[in-house]
């Protein structure tokens, strides 16, 4: 609570009987009740209202769907790279150990090779050929 410090009056007026009442009294522009806003609430106010009534919608489905799509694109891309002979097994000198990069290249090659074999199986269903014959075709 604010209390008056001094009873000095610079305007020559008399001191109010109770200075604390003057301090606690409402000001010139004071309103008894805050006006109601007819505009829309701000975003942070909407968030507080939504938390009270509704739970937030989970975005887990969108994240999982995006990851599955990216994995499918990587699978197709690796199988195309193997089919065009742009990706091959890592060649390591005999007796040497494989580095991490060689192991990663072998992994990506095996994924691409399985994709290529899958595509050959699917294509053979439409063409009516045996997938093993696709590798032995004379051009």
Image (tube, rainbow, N blue to C red):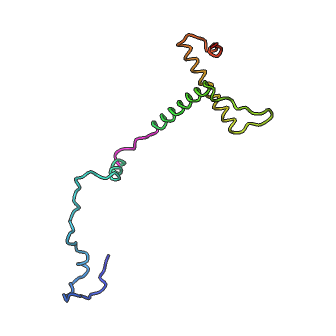
Residue 79 in the image: above or below residue 36:
above
Does the magenta segment cover residue 71? Answer: no
Q: Residue furthest top?
A: 128
**41 relative position to 133: left or right:** left
Q: Position of residue 26 (x, y in %)?
A: 22, 72
Q: Position of residue 45 (x, y in %)?
A: 33, 53
Picture residue at 32% right of the left edge, 75% below the top: 1
Does the magenta segment cover residue 55? Answer: yes
Q: Quadrant of residue 116?
A: top right
Q: Which residues lie in the magenta part? A: 52-60
Front position in the image: 33 or 109 = 109
Q: Quadrant of residue 111?
A: top right
Q: Residue furthest front?
A: 139
Picture residue at 34% right of the left edge, 51% below the top: 43
Q: Quadrant of residue 17?
A: bottom left
**75 relative position to 56: left or right:** right
**30 relative position to 60: left or right:** left
Front position in the image: 93 or 109 = 93
Front position in the image: 60 or 66 = 66
Picture residue at 57% right of the left edge, 20% below the top: 119
Quarter of the image with the C terminus in it: top right
Q: Residue furthest right?
A: 95
Q: Main secondary structure of the magenta part?
A: loop
Q: Position of residue 101 (x, y in %)?
A: 68, 38
**How many discs appear?**
0
């Amino acid at each position: 609570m604010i209390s008056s410090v001094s009873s000095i009056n610079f305007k020559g007026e008399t001191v109010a009987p109770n200075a604390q009442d003057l301090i606690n009294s409402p000001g010139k522009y004071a309103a008894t009740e805050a006006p109601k806003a007819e505009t829309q609430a701000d975003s942070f106010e909407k968030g507080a209202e939504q938390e009270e009534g509704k739970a937030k919608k989970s975005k887990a489905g969108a994240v999982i769907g995006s990851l599955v799509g990216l994995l499918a694109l990587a699978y197709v891309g690796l199988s195309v790279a193997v089919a065009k002979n742009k990706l091959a097994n890592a060649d390591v000198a005999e007796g040497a150990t494989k580095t991490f990069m060689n192991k990663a290249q072998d992994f990506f090659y095996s994924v691409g090779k399985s994709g290529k074999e899958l595509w050959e199986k699917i294509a053979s269903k439409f063409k009516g050929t045996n997938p093993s014959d696709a590798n032995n075709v004379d051009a």
